[in-house]
Image (spheres, rainbow, N blue to C red):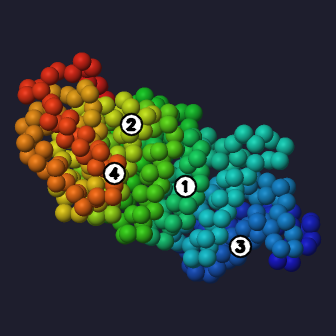
Amino acid sequence: MSFFFNRNRVRANTQDLSKQAKEHVLKLDGPGGPAKAEELAKVLAQMKLVLQGTGEAESSPEQVYQLVQGLIEEDLLFLLAQNLARLPFESRKDTQVIFSYVFRFRLPAVSPKSDPVALSYVVNNRPQVLLELCRGYDSKESATPAGTVLREVLKNEAVAAIILYDDGEEPGSSSKGVVAIDRERPQSGNGVFWRFFDWIDKSSFEVAADAFTTFRELLTKHKELVPRYLSINFDLFFEKYNHTLVQSSSYVTKRQSIKLLGELLLDRSNYNVMTAYVDRGEHLKIIMNLLRDDRKMVQYEGFHVFKVFVANPHKSVAVQKILLMNRDKLLNFLSHFLEDRTDDEQFIDEREFLIKQIRNMPSQPVPPTRQPNHGM
């Protein structure tokens, strides 16, 4: 840590750190790769000290800005994100700290409402950095540090848009920066966002849990961006959601996904998405099957989605037909459904409400006065 005690040396060191790190990263595949990994680890540790400071010296905004500029000029943010899984354990932790500090750094003289320097650069000029961080879920080594950084920056709507609207190198996708995104163009399903379904369903428990946490943040943080996205990509999204997540063979994935589905449908900002979802008879069949699952918490979470169908005053004819065809069975089933939840008064009230709603349905389907939004 002695380099902190000579100002001129600090400045030179700071300017040179990004170049050194880039050289080491690019040689990880070559002869002497392990030695280069050790050298890279030392440089990353120095970068972390520049950003965090030490007990003897605080970090300097001037030095931090020089480091941020170096990271941008050498394209090191992309290289580190791309190679995160190949770094030693301590280096991955240091890289996580570097990303977190750099993505938060604002120039002292600039308005606190302005975007941080590096984050603004990435969303406008180098969105591939964020896409590579998402691909950190391809490996258990990089999943946690990449996910931690992603959840911090997902507070920024532009970051969420970059991930949602990535569609490879297609025109109108996010590959050219947030300004180039065509938000009205339906997705092909080839972008990085759509890989979350497999990362959640098919990865190890640790990777799947982290990926689901990021996935949930992505879908719940931004109340204008996400409803618009889900409306335009309604069929593709819910086909994958229902069949990959809600019907997953993993108990944890299944339970979490049903709970999130209920949250999405009951969020006021997703009203149009909710009405389109509960118009579909095939969706109702999936949810009704959850009520008969072997595991009570799956039944319970499924109930909270089922009640949205039943409580909807404008049920589609398809939904009415299913409920009427199964009315007697449903009334009998619900009267004994999760009857051991004797202390949950809200659940008991809701269960009784649904029983009453189903019992009082007319004997034949009645076309709803509101036309279903099948255009989603």
Check residue 45 in the rendering and tell me which mark sits there, or answer none. 3
Report the amino acid beneath label 2. Leu
Mark 4 to mark 3 CA distance (whole Å): 55 Å
The residue beneath circle 2 is 230
Q: Is residue 162 above or below residue 297?
A: above
In the image: residue 228, left or right of residue 250: right
- Earlier along the polypeptide chain: callout 2 or callout 3? 3
Q: Residues within 10 Å of mark 3 (few under 14, many from 20)?
A: some
Q: Secondary structure at mark 2?
A: helix
Q: Are marks 4 and 3 in contact (CB under 8 Å)?
A: no
In the image: residue 2, left or right of residue 235: right
Residue found 45% across the figure and 45% down from its top: 219
> Viewer-nearest of labels 4 and 3?
4
Mark 3 to mark 1 CA distance (whole Å): 21 Å
Report the amino acid beneath label 1. Leu
Check residue 345 in the rendering and tell me which mark sits there, or answer none. 4
